[in-house]
Image: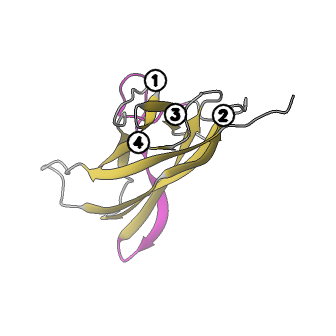
């Protein structure tokens, strides 16, 4: 009997927001960009999870320390399992702070962590910080073909 394969396309989209600095601190700011986590084609018959990466970059002045980045749950998920949706269907995934994909990146609640962006390149008092976001879709989720997406808000505190 020939094996059939069912392919799904999944994409996690990241949107940015930045938290205002506390009034007691000197005025400072960051310019922030993000690269969404694109998982590509998802095969629901494989026993291997589908991994993807994205990134957060910030250019901050003054640049004494890196900003702290937190991620929300997304539009329909929880920190235990974020969900991408397509019509009425959902595909579980999550975002992690480590390459082994064991520590869920969130807002510091429900067992999640926030992450301090790291950097080193300084030019005219502006330091560039960055951090990779590691994503994973667990294997063997049977979902209809479609473009699955979620919107995760990244909040920087600096």
Identify the residue position indicated by label 1 in the image.
80
Identify the disc placed on residue 139: none
The answer for how far apart the CA atoms under marks 1 and 4 are is 15 Å
Upstream in the sequence, badge 1 or badge 3? Answer: 1
The answer for how far apart the CA atoms under marks 2 and 4 are is 18 Å
Where is residue 117 shown, x and y percent of the image? 44, 51
Q: Are marks 1 and 4 in contact (CB under 8 Å)?
A: no
- Residue occupying the point 70% across, 31% down: 45
- Using the rendered image of the protein, determine whether residue 141 is visible from the camera's viewpoint: yes
The answer for how far apart the CA atoms under marks 3 and 4 are is 10 Å
Identify the disc placed on residue 49: 2
- Residue occupying the point 52% across, 37% down: 96
Upstream in the sequence, badge 1 or badge 4? Answer: 1
Quick one: SS at disc 1? Answer: loop
Identify the disc placed on residue 93: 3
Q: Residue furthest right?
A: 1
Upstream in the sequence, badge 3 or badge 2? Answer: 2
Quick one: SS at disc 4? Answer: loop
Colour convention of the picture: secondary structure
Q: Are marks 3 and 4 in contact (CB under 8 Å)?
A: yes
- Using the rendered image of the protein, determine whether residue 158 is visible from the camera's viewpoint: no
In this view, the residue in front, 37 or 58, is: 37
Upstream in the sequence, badge 3 or badge 4? Answer: 3
In this view, the residue in front, 55 or 114, is: 55
Magenta segment = 103-125
Identify the residue position indicated by label 4 in the image.
150
How crowded is the residue under tag 4: few (<14 C-alpha within 10 Å), some, or many (20+)? many
In this view, the residue in front, 11 or 101, is: 11
Q: Is 114 left or right of 53, judged from the image as shown?
A: left
How crowded is the residue under tag 3: few (<14 C-alpha within 10 Å), some, or many (20+)? many
């Amino acid at each position: 009997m020939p094996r059939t394969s069912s392919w799904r396309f999944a994409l996690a989209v990241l949107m940015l927001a930045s938290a205002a600095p506390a009034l007691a601190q000197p005025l400072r700011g960051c310019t922030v960009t993000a690269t969404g986590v694109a998982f590509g084609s998802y095969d629901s018959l494989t026993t291997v999870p589908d991994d993807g990466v994205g990134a957060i970059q910030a250019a901050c002045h003054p640049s004494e320390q890196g900003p702290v980045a937190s991620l929300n749950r997304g539009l329909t998920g929880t920190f235990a399992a974020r969900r991408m949706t397509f019509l009425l269907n959902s595909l579980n995934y999550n975002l992690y702070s480590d390459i082994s994909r064991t520590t869920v990146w969130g807002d510091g609640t429900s067992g999640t962590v926030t992450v301090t962006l790291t950097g080193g390149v300084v030019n005219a008092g502006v330091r560039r910080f960055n951090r990779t976001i590691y994503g994973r879709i667990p294997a063997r989720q049977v979902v209809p073909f479609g473009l699955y997406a979620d919107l995760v808000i990244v909040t920087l505190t600096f």
